[in-house]
Image (cartoon, helix red, strand yellow):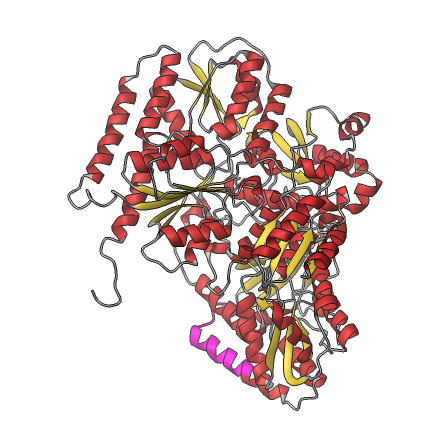
Amino acid sequence: MSVSNLSNNQILNYGLPCSMAGAICALTGIDGIDVLVNGPSACTGFTTGLLDGCHPLQERNSALFSRLAQKGHPRISCSEITDTDVILGIGDKLVQAVDLLVRKRPCECIAIVNSCSLSLIGEDASNILKDHALSDNILYLESTGCSKSFAKGFSEAIIQLIGKVAEPQAKFRDATVNILGLPITQYSWKHDIREIRRLMTLGGIRINTVLAAQSTLEEIRRLPAAGLNVVTNPDYGLSIAMFLEERYRLPYIATERMPIGFTATRTLMDHVLGFFNLPASGALIEEERRCRKEAVLALSHSQRTDLLRGLPVAVFGEYDFVSGLSLFLREYLGCRPVILGIEGRDDVNSGDIRTLYADSDDMELMLNPDADRTMAAIRKKRPVITFGSGFEEYLLAQTDYSPKYFVQTTLPGFNRPNLVYRPYMGYAGALTFIDAVLNCKLTHRYPYSEAGG
Amino acid sequence: MDETKTKYCLPRVKGSQLSCTLVGSLGVLLNLHHTAVLLHGTAGCAHYGLKFCQQMLMREGEIFPGFSPPSLNFRTTALTENELIFGGEDRLSTKIEEMLAAFPDFPLLVIPSCIVEVIGDDVKGVCERLSRQTGRTVNYFNMGGFLKGDHYQGVNSAYFDLIDRFLKPSVKIEPKKVNLVTERSLMPSADIDFLEVRRLLGLLGLVVNTRFVRNLPFEDLQNVTRAALNLPAVCNQSIAVCERLHQKFQMPFVHEGFPSGFEDTRNWLSAIAQALALKADIDALMETEQAFFYSEINRLGNPFNGLKIVVNSIPVHLGWLIEFLEMIGADLMEVNILDTGYFQQDFMDSPEALSCPVNARMRFEDMMANNRLKNAELYLQCSVHYSPIPNHQPGLLIKEIPVVPPVGPRGILNLFANWSQWMRPTGVEGWRHERFESIE
């Protein structure tokens, strides 16, 4: 295994962008919160462009269009700070924007997020808002950081929000969990929520909230009432779970990586059920058996048994996803991950992957890869199936080897919708990837040759 | 020459930046091939800049094979909190040295982002010092992110810097060669428009000297001043660039952007012929073009003949569209111009210039009410964001007007072919009849 570490993002990282975008993503995922970006409209526009594709809302076609919502996402506004404001003070513009937002779109909470350049100026916006009696129901994030990752911005914003709105209260009587760490920028987030809810329900467990993914402020207020926090994506959810444990003595179970595949799902469910001293229900056992049977029937078809063993694949994305998917592809399907590109981590800790692939002499692990390295690795390793974002697809299109297939698994997706139920996590998630891999491979069963051979 | 208009259907909102100067300049400089570009700022800005440029080129899922990935020579200093507190000049120096070693044959272009302006790094000083020390030219572009203005100012700043520093007067002028200046590189239609422009120029016996700047090798910048005439792509922005070229190198230019529609094309060709003192029968050329247009319409069948159409727009240039609708025999009932007070008005045609009923400066609610009364068979509108009618209503045909008007007669013909295809009889489109609380 070779490792190329381009850490510190010194070379362009194709992962998700800055921590401000992460904070906006987290807050936009909660109904009842309107986000006001205190900064230049350009930074806002770029972020809304990303989020609008993940969580489109109906207001785009309505007369609710306003100056504040002109950046493409009705719940993200901007104070439109310019150079003059930086010199003369941002107070007036901020107050004007908050005032306009309050009048135009009544909401439960306004979250003000400073852009990095504004946070450097050091103006005390919270006092300005207090002076104008505008501090009610306002969450003010002074700095989301300039060099932190998207995931860090996400979790820090959520921690601040929880600190403001969550209330200690009596525990729910039934076995109830909070799901932490599923951002709406995850390509399959809607399907994953559905799958997790389905499995938990089959196991007799109730979900209070899937935090920051179509959750509500009321659910966040009730967070401490749950019996357990379940972290499905450690990068996004682990620090939130640790905060909740410290603040409210709320225990948590964290997966090492995204629970992709049968074993990972089974382990997660066993841990959660074990925590509540619940036996695995018949329905849950039956569901696992059904999905496993479907997988085996598909894979053991007489013409497919030899298709996937040793198949070179590449996986690009954030650590939790890459780690989870590559392990499933390798351990269950027998594929051979030849490139793993881990993006969007500023404190890359790939120890886990390094250990897992210690015996793999032809696997290239790239941390925060850039276009050059990605392109070079793809040309060298020639993966037959590449899982990744539109960026990798774009680079793949520049190469001339064959066969090669691309499966969209992360953003940016360049306007591709993801409508059909295809979760990544859970038992159904395992079938999603088996289906994707088999269909790619079967398409190329008999390679076309120009020589007629 | 008439006052120039920007032929965009994308609105410009007063005080809004669209995107920052940094991304505007990147859009230009990444089109300059055989260079290495270093962004001095945070990794997030680099990500956005590149994603913006690539996303514009990858919309609709299309990947344009002729477009080489500009990112391959693009780097960022990726400043962290540490540098923002103690200064990022050391990091910049290190990165420049790394890039000079990595790209020994390419000139290095350094662009600072707004956060660098805030902390006050002396980027120019570092570039000059390293230029002296290494004997290689490190080119500093003064962009400064949002602190220096908006996207278009970034575009123009990049052009001005290129003109002032890299272009040299040419000893020989090629009388039959022209430059295309500031093409809309971030629009997927840029290369399609180029084909039509090249065809039209061919009618006058002219050829394209350079595309300044669109997929242009850095070394070819020297050839820019050889052209006899500069042709701006977009009026308002491009004119400033053409004026700069005129001031520095006495290069003449026409005051019109790439033409949309027949009248525009006639004027554009006439202006070129006049500027270069060409003897060309423009009327005969245009007659041929029109004859071809009508023959193609007849061949394809014209579903717009007599069709009742209402245009809902924001204040943008619409002359080409009105002319097009008249040519295809549509019954243009009226044009409604939305005015919420925050669109820039300077790109709009005066209502008198449009040969149809125009309701200027309408409120959103009035436009909605007006639309309900009209019972048009087709509504044309600029963008779903500015639509007075939800585009999922049953029985309504709503078509979006292209953000960039198609260029030349063939561009219009292409638009006609696309819209005709769209107008063909179809099923009832059941999805439009769905009723959910969340949509309503």
Instruction: Place residue A40 in its image quadrant.
Output: top right
As rendered, which of A160 and B102 lies closer to the eye? Answer: B102
Left or right placement of residue B317 versus residue B192 in this view: right
Left or right placement of residue B148 versus residue A428 in this view: right
Q: Considering only vertical position in the picture, is A27 above or below B221?
A: above
Residue A186 is inside the magenta segment: no
What residue appears at the point 74 percent right and 58 percent down from the top-left corner? B345
What residue appears at the point 39 percent right and 11 percent down from the top-left corner? A276
Q: Considering only vertical position in the picture, is B107 above or below A435?
A: below
As rendered, which of A180 and B379 lies closer to the eye? Answer: A180
The total of numbered circles placed on residues is: 0
Q: Main secondary structure of the magenta part?
A: helix
As rendered, which of A238 and B366 lies closer to the eye? Answer: A238
Q: In the rendered image, which quarter contains the N terminus of chain B?
A: bottom right
Q: Considering only vertical position in the picture, is B23 above or below A217?
A: below
Q: Considering only vertical position in the picture, is B407 above or below A131?
A: below
Q: How far across and down, in percent of the image, does residue A18 sit?
A: 60, 39
Query: Which residue occupies the extreme left position in the image?
Result: A302
Stretch in magenta: B289-306
Query: Which residue occupies the extreme right position in the image?
Result: A88
Q: How far across and down, in percent of the image, does residue A62 sit?
A: 59, 44
As rendered, which of A197 and A374 lies closer to the eye? Answer: A374
Residue B142 visible in the current orientation: no
Q: How far across and down, in percent of the image, does residue B82 sit?
A: 68, 35
